Image: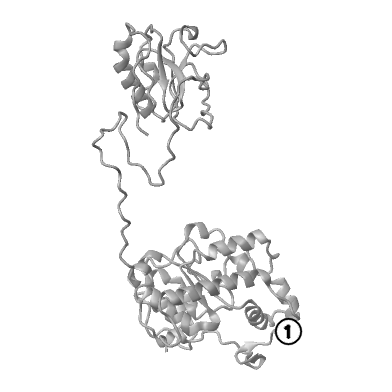
Amino acid sequence: MSVRVVPSLARPSKQSRRAPRLKQLAIKYNKGVADVEDVPNHECEHDALVDRARGNCCSYCCGGVFCAGVALVTLSFLRPWQHFHPLRSSAAPPSAILMTAAQPSSIPAPSIPASPTRLAHAHRSPSPCPLPPRPLPSPHPSPPLSLLSPSPSTPPFQPSAPQNPAPMTSSDRLQAILPLVWVHVPKTGTSFGNLLYHHPKICPYFPSDAIIGSPGFENQDEFLHHRDELCPGSFSHAYLPPAPHHQHDAFGDAYPLTIGHAFIMLRKPSQRILSHWYDSTWENDEPAALYARRTSGLTVRMLIRNEDTLFDRCCSQEEVDLALQRLSTFAFVGITSRWSLTVCLFHAMFGGDAKSSDLFNARPGDHSSSKVHGLYDESLLDGYVDTADTALYELGLNIFERNMEQYGVSEEACA
């Protein structure tokens, strides 16, 4: 909105020659570079003026009202209020509003705490001033205008056409997500570590013949203690420090520090629970259905909580919603049951050549007799469904399939 100085409508005042000085001070005050104490305490006459931004008649000492639409400015150098017309009011203080926020008349003027030099409220009187209705705001942003009325020759603002950024390369995408974090949910694929550690731009000093889980690389603990040397700058210290006993830590505290940098593998909850149950039977002999209830929502709890989550109480709907929101910000989501496509998608997004180690199963398990076509018998769960983790898995599957389409990954392309 432009700012204009309305000429005085009353008889010229002997103080009107001070108007330019007051105008400049008011402008500086509005910009925050001058305060009302900078204005001398002059004796002023009554000059009736019109605030065209609000359609209200008001009075202003020594010059004019600036219809700035920027701020409420109250100066303390006016003569007693009753000297001014038409703003006579017995309740009015000895100060008056010199600048008013230009807002639609249906919106009340903002209230500012009172002070010796700043009035608390903009006092208004019904105005006989006929003004045309204000035009509706333009849907396009307006360019900055000077405090004086613009020249008629000023060309209309033309927004520039948006520029399409250059497409990111796989190397660009990788650099954007480093340092990364790997949120390792139990029984979703320890072998995913091979995919990360054998990428030449993630771990340039990792031995090419070392495969996690293979007979020739049994000392995984030693590697984890030296990960910063083998993968300089690639893994965030906000989560999963280089020690084996931290592999399945809760992610809650680390999330705000690693937004957009997290990798995760997800597995169908019933299959993950049964795999975990078989892997834990050396500790207990409880039925699979009971174990499923005690560990339900494990993935959701890992994403939002900060403590040990294995046997913690399951989740509220608010926690599920929060976990869904967090998963949507992850840099990469893979699916355990679609391992080959996960490997292919990873390389399509972040580069690097596929290696035999990418498909190596580091933790095959010893319960193949319990599987039918590679899947565990879910009847052992007595119909129990982990609804919290199922919601998270379904979102992860949608993200995975959307990324496959975006990066041109398919069974045929990855064969």
Instruction: Give the residue type that dot 1 points to.
Output: Leu
Across and down, in percent, residue 386 comes to 68, 73
Q: Quadrant of the N terminus?
A: top left
Q: Quadrant of residue 353 in the image?
A: bottom left
Frontmost residue, 223 versus 45: 45
Vertical placement of residue 330 versus 253, above or below: below
Frontmost residue, 144 versus 88: 88
Q: Which residue shows up at 51% across the image and 28% down it?
A: 109
Across and down, in percent, residue 382 comes to 76, 81
Instruction: Please say whether residue 295 is visible from this viewpoint.
Output: yes
> Which residue is under mark 1?
380
Across and down, in percent, residue 82 comes to 50, 7
Q: Which residue shows up at 46% across the image and 63% down it?
A: 260
Q: Quadrant of residue 321 in the image?
A: bottom right
| In-image side of 312 versus 170 (left or right) | right
Instruction: Please say whether residue 178 is visible from this viewpoint.
Output: no
Q: Which residue shows up at 57% across the image and 13% down it?
A: 91
Vertical placement of residue 306 versus 214, above or below: above
Vertical placement of residue 372 versus 107, above or below: below
Across and down, in percent, residue 202 comes to 38, 72
Vertical placement of residue 183 versus 6, above or below: below
